[in-house]
Image (cartoon, rainbow, N blue to C red):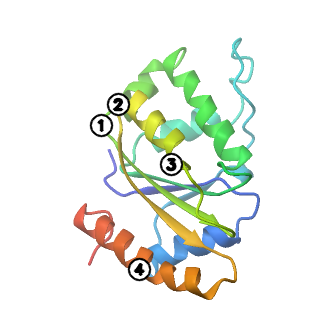
C-alpha cells in the first residue's frame, strides 16, 4: 500500500474554490490527485450493469493509498453531485467487489470543502457515517470560506493553520 495520501476532487470546476482550498493546504507539496468530473462514472445500479465505467478501475488505485482526502464544495447544503455519486458507488464494494471494500477498512479519511455563504451545519455527517460504516477513521474537515465577508475570510487563516497542524501531526504533510 502507498502511504502517500490521495486527494479525490468532486467538483464541477477543476480550478474552482475547492481546488484553491486544496492548494492552500498542500502548498508546494502537491499530492496525488483524482478529478472525479473527468471520469465516466454512472450512478449506483443494483444490477451492476455499469461495471464497465471508470469506478472500479479508480477504486483499484484508491485502495492503494492512505489517507484519502475527499474534496467537494458545498452545493445546496451538501456535497456535490459527483461526490455523492462516487460515495454511492461504494455500495459496489459491499457486494460484487467486496475485495476492494475490505481494503478501505482502517484507512484514514479527511475532508476539504469550500463554501461561500454561512458555515454549513451537519455537512460532515454523511462522510463521518460513511467512514464508520466502511471501518475507516474520519480524521477531520477543513472548511474554506470563498465568499466576500472579511471576517469569515480571516477565519480561513486560523482554519488553515489548524488543518495543516492536524495533517502534519498525523504524518500526511511533511513539516
Q: Mark 1 points at which residue?
A: 106
> What crowding class fits label 4: few (fewer than 14 Cα within 10 Å), some (14-19), or many (20 or more)?
few
Q: Distance between the residues labelled 3 and 4?
A: 19 Å
Q: What element carries label 2?
A: loop
Image quarter in which the N terminus is found: top left
Of badges 3 and 2, the one in the foreground is 3
Which of the 4 quarters of the picture holds residue 148? bottom right
Answer with left or right where residue 1 lies relative to residue 72: left
Q: Nearer the viewer, residue 89 or 157?
A: 157
At x 30% / y 66%, what residue is drawn? 166
At x 46% / y 83%, what residue is drawn? 157
Q: Is mark 3 on a helix, strand or loop?
A: loop
Percent position of residue 84, x then y: 66, 40
> What crowding class fits label 3: few (fewer than 14 Cα within 10 Å), some (14-19), or many (20 or more)?
some
Of badges 2 and 4, the one in the foreground is 4
Q: Are circles 3 and 2 on residues that touch, CB within 8 Å?
A: no
Q: Mark 3 points at which residue?
A: 124
Residue closest to the far top: 47
Q: In this view, does 102 lie above or below 83?
A: above
Q: Name the residue under label 4.
A: 158
Ranked by sequence position, the earlier of labels 2 and 1 is: 1
Image quarter in which the C terminus is found: bottom left
Amino acid at each position: 500500500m502507498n502511504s502517500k495520501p490521495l486527494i479525490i476532487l468532486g467538483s464541477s470546476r477543476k480550478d474552482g474554490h475547492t481546488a484553491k482550498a486544496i492548494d492552500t493546504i498542500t502548498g508546494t507539496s502537491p499530492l496525488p490527485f483524482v478529478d472525479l468530473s473527468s471520469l465516466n462514472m454512472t450512478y449506483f445500479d443494483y444490477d451492476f450493469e455499469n461495471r464497465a465505467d471508470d469506478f472500479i478501475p479508480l477504486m483499484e488505485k484508491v485502495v492503494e493509498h492512505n489517507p484519502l482526502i475527499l474534496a467537494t464544495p458545498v452545493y445546496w447544503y451538501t456535497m456535490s453531485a459527483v461526490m455523492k455519486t462516487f460515495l454511492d458507488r461504494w455500495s459496489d464494494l459491499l457486494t460484487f467487489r467486496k475485495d476492494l471494500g475490505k481494503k478501505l477498512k482502517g484507512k484514514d479519511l479527511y475532508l476539504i470543502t469550500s463554501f461561500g455563504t454561512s458555515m454549513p451545519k451537519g455537512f460532515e455527517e454523511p462522510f463521518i457515517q460513511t467512514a464508520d460504516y466502511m471501518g475507516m477513521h474520519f480524521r477531520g474537515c477543513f472548511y474554506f470560506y470563498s465568499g466576500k465577508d472579511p471576517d469569515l475570510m480571516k477565519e480561513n487563516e486560523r482554519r488553515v493553520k489548524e488543518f495543516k497542524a492536524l495533517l502534519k501531526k498525523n504524518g500526511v504533510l511533511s513539516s
